[in-house]
Image (cartoon, grey):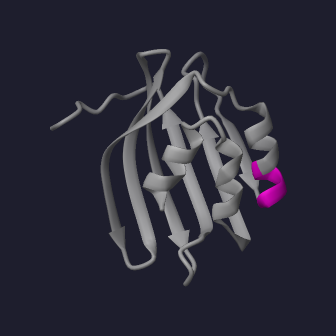
Amino acid sequence: MLVRWFEIMDSDVPDDVLGLLAEDFQFSVVFSTGDDTTARDFAGGRDAMVGYLEQREKGTRVHRLLATGASGETEFALGEVIRLGEWEASFVASALLDGQGRLRRLIIGRSPGVAFPAGE
């Protein structure tokens, strides 16, 4: 599901991720730009995700997955954010799926503070 999530987020219709959400969906995206010591946490349920999508830049960033894994209904991903062709940040993500493969919980942490070498 995380692979699909990032494919949709990088597409021309990122709002389509709303179709992946379970009824009891909750999320947190902790977003650091590295410009200072603060980070912004976008968190909540479906309505908060709508707000997150509305403020998000479209068409400037892509997510490159470096590693993915799963344990039962929990998925994990390590990746990097590429903005206008240049590395911008690393991210980790974890998702808990419901019995129908929809997202119940999602947490993503993003920071330019560390880069993971691709392919190692």
Q: Would residue 110 be found to the left or right of residue 50 on screen?
A: left
User: Which residue is at the front of the view, 61 or 78?
Assistant: 61
In the image, residue 90 lies at what x, y percent?
A: 42, 33
In the image, residue 106 lies at what x, y percent?
A: 59, 59
Q: Would residue 43 be found to the left or right of residue 1 on screen?
A: right
Q: Name above or below for residue 91 compared with residue 105.
A: above
Q: Which residues are magenta?
A: 45-49
* Farthest bottom residue in view: 99
User: Which residue is at the front of the view, 101 or 31?
Assistant: 101
The residue that appears at 80% across and 48% down in the rendered structure is: 50
In the image, residue 33 lies at what x, y percent?
A: 58, 23
The count of marks equals 0
Q: Name above or below for residue 7 compared with residue 23.
A: above
Give the quadrant of the C terminus. top left
In the image, residue 55 lies at what x, y percent?
A: 77, 32
* Farthest left residue in view: 120
The residue that appears at 71% across and 32% down in the rendered structure is: 56
The residue that appears at 54% across and 37% down in the rendered structure is: 10
Q: Name above or below for residue 100 compared with residue 112.
A: below
Q: Would residue 91 be found to the left or right of residue 11 on screen?
A: left
Any magenta on residue 95? no
Question: What predominant SS class does the magenta segment belong to?
Answer: helix
